[in-house]
Image (tube, rainbow, N blue to C red):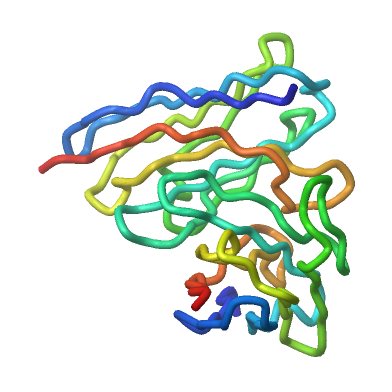
Amino acid sequence: SSELTQDPAVSVALGQTVRITCQGDSLRRFYASWYQQKPGQAPVLVIYGQNNRPSGIPDRFSASNSGNTASLTITGAQSGDEADYYCESRDYSANFYVFGSGTKVTVL
Amino acid sequence: QVQLVESGGGVVQHGRSLRLSCAASGFTFSKYGVHWVRQGPGRGLEWVALVSSDGNSEYYADSVKGRFTITRDNFKSTVDLQMNSLRAEDTALYYCARELYGYAGSLDYWGQGTLVTVSS
């Protein structure tokens, strides 16, 4: 299957922890990358590989993987973390790539 | 600093063609794969195509296969996306993005996008 499934929306209280999940068969074979996108802006890579953050991404962003599920955790959510988050991975056949449907994170 | 700048977007009639370009600077272009990703109005991200660092391999989403062609010029540091037989559902903001070296599919730098509108 080439689909990656994400919950449409999740909310978190300021300073609390939120986990965003991404499910798909390809995640049994490949790690997901995670992107943050704020309105009117290009996406920003926040996690790649098993659990790696690009330079400049705060360490409150972390990832985990189990079976067909990849998770992005924001520990101590800030108002600036309010955004859409997308997972992305190679298709199981490795011939193309697919994005998840996206999760809108609201910080209360 | 790494920069990717897309151009070539515009309004085009259904069934016609358009060519997008992505100009890169600030890094050794020939070492990196480059992707095109699009985002329809109010919609999520959709992966479109990838060209390998040497230009010898191309990959496409099923939704564009046979209609779109991705090419690159490592001397000019550019990647083009030739889009033929355009449809209303191709209307989107098109981003080019650099693939993180050693991590297939992880896109570490993105342009600001170029808007394509397909009219009937």
Question: In the image, residue B55 lies at what x, y percent?
Answer: 72, 29
* B12 to the left or right of B23: left
Question: In the image, residue A55 lies at what x, y percent?
Answer: 83, 45
Q: Is residue B80 above or below residue A75?
A: above
Residue placed most toward the observer, A73 or B35 = A73
Q: Is residue B49 above or below residue A17?
A: above
Q: Confirm whether residue A24 shows in the render.
A: no
* B94 to the left or right of A56: left
Quarter of the image containing the N terminus of chain B?
top right
Residue placed most toward the observer, B70 or B20 = B20
Q: Confirm whether residue B38 shows in the render.
A: yes
In the rendered image, the residue lying farthest to the top is B75
Quarter of the image containing the C terminus of chain B?
top left
Residue at 51 percent of width and 70 percent of height: A102
Counting every numbered tag in the picture gives 0
Residue placed most toward the observer, A31 or B64 = A31
Which of the 4 image quarters holds residue A79?
A: bottom right
* B39 to the left or right of B24: left
Which of the 4 image quarters holds residue B49?
A: top right
Q: Is residue B1 above or below residue A29?
A: above
Residue at 60 percent of width and 77 percent of height: A14
Question: In the image, residue B3 lies at what x, y percent?
Answer: 65, 24
In the rendered image, the residue lying farthest to the bottom is A67
Residue at 68 percent of width and 16 percent of height: B77
Question: In the image, residue B15 lies at what x, y percent?
Answer: 21, 38
